[in-house]
Protein backbone atom coordinates (compact mmCIF):
# COMPACT_ATOMS: atom_id res chain seq x y z
CA UNK A 1 0.00 0.00 0.00
CA UNK A 2 1.15 3.51 -0.79
CA UNK A 3 1.63 5.10 2.64
CA UNK A 4 1.56 8.64 1.25
CA UNK A 5 -1.24 10.68 2.79
CA UNK A 6 -2.59 13.27 0.40
CA UNK A 7 -4.42 16.30 1.66
CA UNK A 8 -7.00 15.71 -1.07
CA UNK A 9 -7.78 13.02 -3.61
CA UNK A 10 -9.97 14.35 -6.42
CA UNK A 11 -11.85 11.59 -8.25
CA UNK A 12 -12.67 12.74 -11.78
CA UNK A 13 -10.71 14.97 -14.13
CA UNK A 14 -13.41 16.89 -15.99
CA UNK A 15 -13.66 20.70 -15.80
CA UNK A 16 -14.87 20.52 -12.20
CA UNK A 17 -12.30 18.05 -10.87
CA UNK A 18 -9.41 19.67 -12.72
CA UNK A 19 -10.39 23.12 -11.43
CA UNK A 20 -10.73 21.83 -7.87
CA UNK A 21 -7.35 20.08 -8.04
CA UNK A 22 -5.59 23.13 -9.47
CA UNK A 23 -7.03 25.49 -6.86
CA UNK A 24 -6.17 23.18 -3.97
CA UNK A 25 -2.62 22.66 -5.25
CA UNK A 26 -2.12 26.40 -5.66
CA UNK A 27 -3.31 26.81 -2.06
CA UNK A 28 -0.38 24.63 -0.98
CA UNK A 29 -2.14 21.30 -0.47
CA UNK A 30 -0.90 17.92 -1.69
CA UNK A 31 -3.39 16.73 -4.30
CA UNK A 32 -3.90 13.56 -6.31
CA UNK A 33 -6.11 13.98 -9.38
CA UNK A 34 -7.51 10.60 -10.39
CA UNK A 35 -8.94 10.37 -13.92
CA UNK A 36 -10.01 7.14 -15.56
CA UNK A 37 -9.33 8.34 -19.12
CA UNK A 38 -10.77 7.22 -22.42
CA UNK A 39 -14.09 8.99 -21.89
CA UNK A 40 -15.36 12.28 -23.25
CA UNK A 41 -18.67 13.57 -21.95
CA UNK A 42 -21.33 14.37 -24.58
CA UNK A 43 -21.52 18.14 -24.47
CA UNK A 44 -22.45 20.93 -26.84
CA UNK A 45 -19.41 22.77 -25.53
CA UNK A 46 -20.97 26.23 -25.09
CA UNK A 47 -19.25 28.57 -22.62
CA UNK A 48 -19.83 32.25 -21.81
CA UNK A 49 -16.96 34.74 -22.15
CA UNK A 50 -17.20 35.31 -18.40
CA UNK A 51 -15.91 31.79 -17.84
CA UNK A 52 -12.74 32.55 -19.77
CA UNK A 53 -12.20 35.60 -17.57
CA UNK A 54 -13.08 33.97 -14.26
CA UNK A 55 -10.88 30.93 -14.82
CA UNK A 56 -8.12 32.42 -16.95
CA UNK A 57 -8.88 30.26 -19.99
CA UNK A 58 -6.99 31.21 -23.18
CA UNK A 59 -8.97 32.21 -26.26
CA UNK A 60 -6.97 29.60 -28.19
CA UNK A 61 -9.11 26.85 -26.62
CA UNK A 62 -12.22 28.18 -28.36
CA UNK A 63 -12.89 26.21 -31.52
CA UNK A 64 -15.72 28.53 -32.59
CA UNK A 65 -17.60 31.69 -31.57
CA UNK A 66 -21.34 31.56 -32.09
CA UNK A 67 -22.99 34.91 -32.72
CA UNK A 68 -26.57 33.67 -32.85
CA UNK A 69 -28.88 30.99 -31.47
CA UNK A 70 -31.69 29.62 -33.61
CA UNK A 71 -34.73 28.17 -31.84
CA UNK A 72 -36.75 25.71 -33.93
CA UNK A 73 -40.37 24.99 -33.02
CA UNK A 74 -42.32 21.75 -33.61
CA UNK A 75 -43.94 23.35 -36.67
CA UNK A 76 -40.50 24.04 -38.15
CA UNK A 77 -40.75 27.76 -37.52
CA UNK A 78 -37.40 29.20 -36.48
CA UNK A 79 -36.54 32.26 -34.41
CA UNK A 80 -33.04 33.71 -34.48
CA UNK A 81 -31.65 35.25 -31.30
CA UNK A 82 -28.54 37.25 -32.25
CA UNK A 83 -26.09 37.84 -29.43
CA UNK A 84 -25.63 41.41 -30.62
CA UNK A 85 -23.19 43.78 -28.97
CA UNK A 86 -22.98 41.70 -25.78
CA UNK A 87 -20.40 39.37 -27.29
CA UNK A 88 -20.47 35.74 -28.35
CA UNK A 89 -20.98 32.20 -27.10
CA UNK A 90 -17.65 30.41 -27.01
CA UNK A 91 -17.47 26.80 -28.13
CA UNK A 92 -14.95 24.25 -26.85
CA UNK A 93 -14.24 20.65 -27.73
CA UNK A 94 -14.23 18.67 -24.49
CA UNK A 95 -11.46 16.35 -25.66
CA UNK A 96 -8.93 19.18 -25.90
CA UNK A 97 -10.47 21.46 -23.26
CA UNK A 98 -10.59 18.90 -20.43
CA UNK A 99 -7.03 17.72 -21.06
CA UNK A 100 -5.75 21.29 -20.99
CA UNK A 101 -7.40 21.79 -17.58
CA UNK A 102 -5.91 18.55 -16.25
CA UNK A 103 -2.45 19.57 -17.39
CA UNK A 104 -2.88 22.96 -15.77
CA UNK A 105 -3.73 21.19 -12.52
CA UNK A 106 -0.53 19.15 -12.84
CA UNK A 107 1.54 22.24 -13.54
CA UNK A 108 -0.08 23.87 -10.50
CA UNK A 109 1.28 21.08 -8.34
CA UNK A 110 -1.33 18.32 -8.41
CA UNK A 111 -0.23 14.77 -9.14
CA UNK A 112 -2.07 13.06 -12.00
CA UNK A 113 -3.04 9.40 -11.98
CA UNK A 114 -4.87 7.46 -14.68
CA UNK A 115 -6.99 4.97 -12.76
CA UNK A 116 -10.49 3.67 -12.16
CA UNK A 117 -11.94 4.55 -8.75
CA UNK A 118 -13.27 1.57 -6.80
CA UNK A 119 -14.45 2.67 -3.36
CA UNK A 120 -13.71 4.48 -0.11
CA UNK A 121 -12.49 2.25 2.71
CA UNK A 122 -12.06 3.01 6.40
CA UNK A 123 -9.91 1.41 9.09
CA UNK A 124 -8.55 2.47 12.47
CA UNK A 125 -6.72 5.40 10.90
CA UNK A 126 -8.65 8.70 11.10
CA UNK A 127 -8.16 9.28 7.38
CA UNK A 128 -10.00 7.17 4.75
CA UNK A 129 -8.48 5.11 1.97
CA UNK A 130 -9.26 5.55 -1.72
CA UNK A 131 -9.05 2.27 -3.61
CA UNK A 132 -8.52 2.10 -7.36
CA UNK A 133 -7.21 0.06 -10.27
CA UNK A 134 -4.79 1.45 -12.82
CA UNK A 135 -6.60 -0.59 -15.44
CA UNK A 136 -9.77 -2.66 -15.45
CA UNK A 137 -9.06 -6.09 -14.04
CA UNK A 138 -5.78 -4.91 -12.53
CA UNK A 139 -4.81 -5.21 -8.87
CA UNK A 140 -6.46 -3.03 -6.24
CA UNK A 141 -4.27 -0.19 -4.97
CA UNK A 142 -4.85 2.28 -2.16
CA UNK A 143 -3.90 5.77 -1.09
CA UNK A 144 -4.93 7.66 2.00
CA UNK A 145 -6.51 11.11 1.97
CA UNK A 146 -7.49 13.71 4.53
CA UNK A 147 -10.27 14.81 2.19
CA UNK A 148 -11.94 13.04 -0.75
CA UNK A 149 -13.62 15.05 -3.50
CA UNK A 150 -16.00 13.27 -5.85
CA UNK A 151 -16.05 14.97 -9.23
CA UNK A 152 -16.83 11.77 -11.09
CA UNK A 153 -19.95 12.90 -12.94
CA UNK A 154 -23.64 12.20 -12.73
CA UNK A 155 -24.51 9.11 -10.71
CA UNK A 156 -21.15 9.53 -9.03
CA UNK A 157 -19.70 6.42 -7.42
CA UNK A 158 -18.29 8.58 -4.63
CA UNK A 159 -21.69 10.20 -3.99
CA UNK A 160 -23.63 6.92 -4.08
CA UNK A 161 -21.25 5.36 -1.57
CA UNK A 162 -20.89 8.30 0.81
CA UNK A 163 -24.04 10.44 0.60
CA UNK A 164 -27.49 9.03 1.51
CA UNK A 165 -30.03 9.36 -1.30
CA UNK A 166 -27.49 10.29 -3.98
CA UNK A 167 -28.33 7.16 -5.97
CA UNK A 168 -31.85 8.48 -6.56
CA UNK A 169 -30.82 11.59 -8.48
CA UNK A 170 -32.95 12.15 -11.60
CA UNK A 171 -31.11 12.53 -14.88
CA UNK A 172 -31.54 13.40 -18.52
CA UNK A 173 -29.64 11.05 -20.80
CA UNK A 174 -27.61 12.87 -23.43
CA UNK A 175 -26.14 11.50 -26.65
CA UNK A 176 -24.29 13.29 -29.40
CA UNK A 177 -22.20 12.64 -32.46
CA UNK A 178 -19.20 14.75 -33.35
CA UNK A 179 -19.05 15.09 -37.12
CA UNK A 180 -16.83 16.87 -39.61
CA UNK A 181 -18.47 20.20 -40.37
CA UNK A 182 -19.95 20.71 -43.84
CA UNK A 183 -17.60 22.45 -46.24
CA UNK A 184 -20.01 25.34 -46.77
CA UNK A 185 -22.56 27.06 -44.56
CA UNK A 186 -26.20 26.82 -45.54
CA UNK A 187 -29.67 27.21 -44.11
CA UNK A 188 -29.40 23.93 -42.21
CA UNK A 189 -25.93 24.57 -40.76
CA UNK A 190 -24.07 27.77 -39.96
CA UNK A 191 -20.61 27.73 -38.34
CA UNK A 192 -21.54 30.89 -36.40
CA UNK A 193 -24.90 29.71 -35.09
CA UNK A 194 -26.17 27.31 -32.39
CA UNK A 195 -29.39 25.53 -33.38
CA UNK A 196 -31.75 24.30 -30.67
CA UNK A 197 -34.69 22.05 -31.64
CA UNK A 198 -37.75 22.12 -29.38
CA UNK A 199 -39.58 19.29 -31.10
CA UNK A 200 -41.26 16.30 -29.46
CA UNK A 201 -40.22 14.02 -32.30
CA UNK A 202 -36.56 14.70 -31.44
CA UNK A 203 -36.97 14.83 -27.66
CA UNK A 204 -40.24 14.30 -25.75
CA UNK A 205 -39.06 16.23 -22.68
CA UNK A 206 -35.85 18.14 -23.43
CA UNK A 207 -34.30 19.41 -26.66
CA UNK A 208 -31.93 18.55 -29.50
CA UNK A 209 -29.06 20.62 -30.81
CA UNK A 210 -26.53 21.32 -33.54
CA UNK A 211 -23.56 23.29 -32.21
CA UNK A 212 -20.57 24.39 -34.32
CA UNK A 213 -17.08 23.37 -33.20
CA UNK A 214 -15.02 24.86 -36.00
CA UNK A 215 -13.81 21.94 -38.10
CA UNK A 216 -16.35 19.71 -36.37
CA UNK A 217 -19.89 20.02 -35.01
CA UNK A 218 -21.88 18.44 -32.19
CA UNK A 219 -25.27 16.96 -33.08
CA UNK A 220 -27.07 15.73 -30.00
CA UNK A 221 -30.22 15.20 -28.02
CA UNK A 222 -31.27 14.71 -24.41
CA UNK A 223 -34.23 12.96 -22.80
CA UNK A 224 -35.20 11.46 -19.45
CA UNK A 225 -37.52 9.02 -21.26
CA UNK A 226 -35.71 5.69 -21.09
CA UNK A 227 -37.76 4.26 -23.94
CA UNK A 228 -36.84 7.06 -26.34
CA UNK A 229 -34.13 6.34 -28.93
CA UNK A 230 -31.48 9.05 -28.66
CA UNK A 231 -29.44 7.53 -31.48
CA UNK A 232 -32.55 7.36 -33.62
CA UNK A 233 -33.28 11.04 -33.00
CA UNK A 234 -29.74 12.07 -33.95
CA UNK A 235 -29.94 9.92 -37.08
CA UNK A 236 -33.22 11.61 -37.99
CA UNK A 237 -31.68 15.05 -37.49
CA UNK A 238 -28.71 14.23 -39.68
CA UNK A 239 -31.02 12.97 -42.41
CA UNK A 240 -33.34 15.98 -42.29
CA UNK A 241 -30.43 18.44 -42.19
CA UNK A 242 -28.52 16.64 -44.97
CA UNK A 243 -25.60 15.87 -42.66
CA UNK A 244 -25.45 12.12 -43.21
CA UNK A 245 -22.53 12.48 -45.62
CA UNK A 246 -20.41 14.23 -42.98
CA UNK A 247 -17.81 11.95 -41.41
CA UNK A 248 -18.56 10.85 -37.86
CA UNK A 249 -15.55 11.52 -35.62
CA UNK A 250 -16.89 9.98 -32.40
CA UNK A 251 -20.08 9.11 -30.49
CA UNK A 252 -20.65 9.77 -26.80
CA UNK A 253 -23.41 9.35 -24.23
CA UNK A 254 -23.87 10.03 -20.53
CA UNK A 255 -26.48 11.01 -17.92
CA UNK A 256 -26.90 14.67 -16.95
CA UNK A 257 -28.39 15.47 -13.51
CA UNK A 258 -31.54 17.57 -13.32
CA UNK A 259 -31.28 19.05 -9.82
CA UNK A 260 -28.57 19.89 -7.25
CA UNK A 261 -28.22 17.38 -4.44
CA UNK A 262 -29.59 18.55 -1.11
CA UNK A 263 -26.29 17.69 0.51
CA UNK A 264 -22.80 17.69 -0.98
CA UNK A 265 -20.74 16.40 1.96
CA UNK A 266 -20.86 13.56 4.45
CA UNK A 267 -20.22 15.80 7.44
CA UNK A 268 -16.77 14.33 7.89
CA UNK A 269 -14.25 14.21 5.03
CA UNK A 270 -16.01 13.63 1.68
CA UNK A 271 -17.56 16.23 -0.61
CA UNK A 272 -18.85 16.09 -4.19
CA UNK A 273 -18.83 18.69 -6.93
CA UNK A 274 -19.92 19.36 -10.52
CA UNK A 275 -22.27 16.83 -12.09
CA UNK A 276 -21.72 14.62 -9.04
CA UNK A 277 -23.39 17.37 -6.99
CA UNK A 278 -26.13 17.81 -9.61
CA UNK A 279 -25.17 21.32 -10.67
CA UNK A 280 -26.25 21.39 -14.30
CA UNK A 281 -28.61 24.19 -15.29
CA UNK A 282 -32.18 22.95 -15.87
CA UNK A 283 -33.81 23.72 -19.23
CA UNK A 284 -30.50 24.57 -20.92
CA UNK A 285 -28.35 21.67 -19.69
CA UNK A 286 -25.41 24.05 -19.37
CA UNK A 287 -22.79 22.53 -17.12
CA UNK A 288 -19.21 23.62 -17.85
CA UNK A 289 -19.33 27.04 -16.23
CA UNK A 290 -21.33 25.81 -13.25
CA UNK A 291 -19.07 22.77 -12.83
CA UNK A 292 -15.97 24.94 -12.70
CA UNK A 293 -17.62 27.46 -10.38
CA UNK A 294 -18.83 24.69 -8.07
CA UNK A 295 -15.38 23.12 -8.21
CA UNK A 296 -13.82 26.38 -7.08
CA UNK A 297 -16.27 26.70 -4.19
CA UNK A 298 -15.54 23.10 -3.17
CA UNK A 299 -11.80 23.76 -3.33
CA UNK A 300 -12.21 26.79 -1.05
CA UNK A 301 -14.33 24.81 1.40
CA UNK A 302 -11.97 21.82 1.36
CA UNK A 303 -8.97 24.08 1.88
CA UNK A 304 -10.61 25.62 4.94
CA UNK A 305 -11.44 22.15 6.23
CA UNK A 306 -7.84 21.00 5.74
CA UNK A 307 -6.50 24.04 7.56
CA UNK A 308 -8.92 24.02 10.48
CA UNK A 309 -10.03 20.39 10.77
CA UNK A 310 -13.62 21.60 11.08
CA UNK A 311 -15.90 19.43 8.90
CA UNK A 312 -18.63 22.08 8.94
CA UNK A 313 -16.47 24.07 6.51
CA UNK A 314 -17.41 21.61 3.78
CA UNK A 315 -21.07 22.69 3.93
CA UNK A 316 -20.17 26.20 2.81
CA UNK A 317 -19.54 25.09 -0.79
CA UNK A 318 -23.19 24.23 -1.43
CA UNK A 319 -24.61 27.18 0.50
CA UNK A 320 -22.34 29.55 -1.41
CA UNK A 321 -23.29 28.06 -4.77
CA UNK A 322 -27.02 28.08 -4.09
CA UNK A 323 -26.90 31.65 -2.79
CA UNK A 324 -25.25 32.74 -6.03
CA UNK A 325 -27.08 30.55 -8.56
CA UNK A 326 -30.01 28.85 -6.82
CA UNK A 327 -32.62 31.35 -7.99
CA UNK A 328 -31.55 31.01 -11.62
CA UNK A 329 -31.71 27.21 -11.31
CA UNK A 330 -35.22 27.43 -9.83
CA UNK A 331 -36.46 29.64 -12.67
CA UNK A 332 -34.88 27.40 -15.31
CA UNK A 333 -36.41 24.36 -13.63
CA UNK A 334 -39.86 25.91 -13.82
CA UNK A 335 -39.26 26.78 -17.49
CA UNK A 336 -38.35 23.20 -18.27
CA UNK A 337 -41.36 21.86 -16.37
CA UNK A 338 -43.85 24.10 -18.18
CA UNK A 339 -42.45 24.67 -21.65
CA UNK A 340 -41.03 21.23 -22.48
CA UNK A 341 -44.16 19.28 -21.56
CA UNK A 342 -45.87 19.32 -24.98
CA UNK A 343 -45.35 20.46 -28.56
CA UNK A 344 -48.15 22.99 -28.10
CA UNK A 345 -46.21 24.66 -25.30
CA UNK A 346 -42.91 24.34 -27.16
CA UNK A 347 -44.46 26.20 -30.08
CA UNK A 348 -45.47 29.03 -27.76
CA UNK A 349 -42.06 29.02 -26.13
CA UNK A 350 -40.29 29.55 -29.46
CA UNK A 351 -42.76 32.31 -30.31
CA UNK A 352 -41.91 34.00 -27.02
CA UNK A 353 -38.22 33.85 -27.93
CA UNK A 354 -38.98 36.24 -30.80
CA UNK A 355 -39.61 38.99 -28.25
CA UNK A 356 -36.74 41.53 -28.07
CA UNK A 357 -37.05 41.96 -24.29
CA UNK A 358 -36.77 38.21 -23.83
CA UNK A 359 -33.74 38.04 -26.10
CA UNK A 360 -31.91 40.90 -24.41
CA UNK A 361 -32.40 39.69 -20.86
CA UNK A 362 -31.72 36.06 -21.83
CA UNK A 363 -28.33 36.94 -23.29
CA UNK A 364 -27.44 39.29 -20.45
CA UNK A 365 -28.30 36.61 -17.89
CA UNK A 366 -26.30 34.00 -19.83
CA UNK A 367 -23.23 36.18 -20.21
CA UNK A 368 -23.26 37.43 -16.61
CA UNK A 369 -24.56 34.24 -14.96
CA UNK A 370 -27.02 36.11 -12.80
CA UNK A 371 -30.46 37.65 -13.09
CA UNK A 372 -30.37 41.16 -14.56
CA UNK A 373 -31.71 43.65 -12.03
CA UNK A 374 -31.23 46.88 -13.94
CA UNK A 375 -34.56 46.66 -15.79
CA UNK A 376 -37.27 45.56 -13.34
CA UNK A 377 -40.12 46.57 -15.67
CA UNK A 378 -38.65 44.42 -18.43
CA UNK A 379 -38.86 41.45 -16.06
CA UNK A 380 -42.49 42.28 -15.32
CA UNK A 381 -43.27 42.49 -19.04
CA UNK A 382 -41.58 39.18 -19.68
CA UNK A 383 -43.45 37.55 -16.80
CA UNK A 384 -46.79 38.75 -18.20
CA UNK A 385 -45.89 37.63 -21.69
CA UNK A 386 -44.70 34.30 -20.33
CA UNK A 387 -48.03 33.74 -18.57
CA UNK A 388 -49.96 34.82 -21.65
CA UNK A 389 -48.09 32.38 -23.87
CA UNK A 390 -48.51 29.60 -21.35
CA UNK A 391 -52.27 30.17 -21.16
CA UNK A 392 -52.65 30.70 -24.90
CA UNK A 393 -53.72 34.35 -24.58
CA UNK A 394 -50.91 36.00 -26.50
CA UNK A 395 -53.23 38.01 -28.75
CA UNK A 396 -54.83 39.70 -25.76
CA UNK A 397 -51.49 41.03 -24.48
CA UNK A 398 -50.10 42.51 -27.68
Image (cartoon, rainbow, N blue to C red):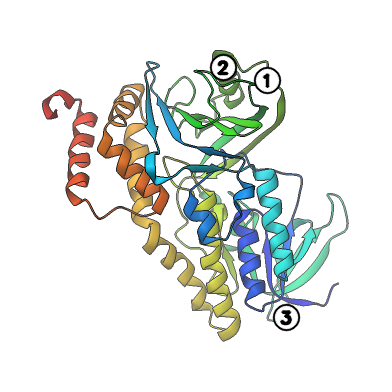
Please give left or right for residue 340 compared with residue 61 in the image.
left
Question: Marks 3 and 1, Cα distance to the nearest angstrom?
Answer: 58 Å
Question: Marks 2 and 3, Cα distance to the nearest angstrom?
Answer: 57 Å
On the image, numbered disc 2 is attached to which residue? 236
* Contact between labelled residues 3 and 2, with CB atoms less than 8 Å apart: no
Residue 143: give x, y in percent of width and height.
Answer: 78, 70
On the image, numbered disc 3 is attached to which residue? 124
Quadrant showing the N terminus: bottom right
Q: Which residue corresponds to the image point at 37% horizontal and 32% vertical from the top-left?
A: 81
Residue 232: give x, y in percent of width and height.
Answer: 59, 20
Quadrant showing the C terminus: top left
Residue 264: give x, y in percent of width and height.
Answer: 51, 63
Please give left or right for residue 359 compared with residue 245 in the image.
left
Per the image, label 3 sits on a secondary structure element best described as loop
How crowded pointer 2 is (Cα within 10 Å; few <14, some 14-19, many 20+) is rated as: some
Label of residue 246 in the image: 1
Give 268 or 174, whichever is nearer the viewer. Answer: 174
Label of residue 220 in the image: none
Per the image, label 1 sits on a secondary structure element best described as loop
Give 346 or 194, whichever is nearer the viewer. Answer: 194
How crowded pointer 1 is (Cα within 10 Å; few <14, some 14-19, many 20+) is rated as: some
Amino acid sequence: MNETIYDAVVVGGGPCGATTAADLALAGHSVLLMERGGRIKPCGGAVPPRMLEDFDIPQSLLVARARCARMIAPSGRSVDMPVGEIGYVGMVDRDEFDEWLRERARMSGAERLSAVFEKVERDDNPHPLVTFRRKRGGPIERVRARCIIGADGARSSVAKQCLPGAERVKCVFAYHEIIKSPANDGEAFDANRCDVFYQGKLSPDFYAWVFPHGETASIGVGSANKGFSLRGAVSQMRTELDLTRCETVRREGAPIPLKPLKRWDNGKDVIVAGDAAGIVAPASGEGIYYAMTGGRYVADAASEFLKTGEAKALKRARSRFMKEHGRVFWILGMMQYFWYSSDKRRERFVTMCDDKDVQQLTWQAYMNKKLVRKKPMAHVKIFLKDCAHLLGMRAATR
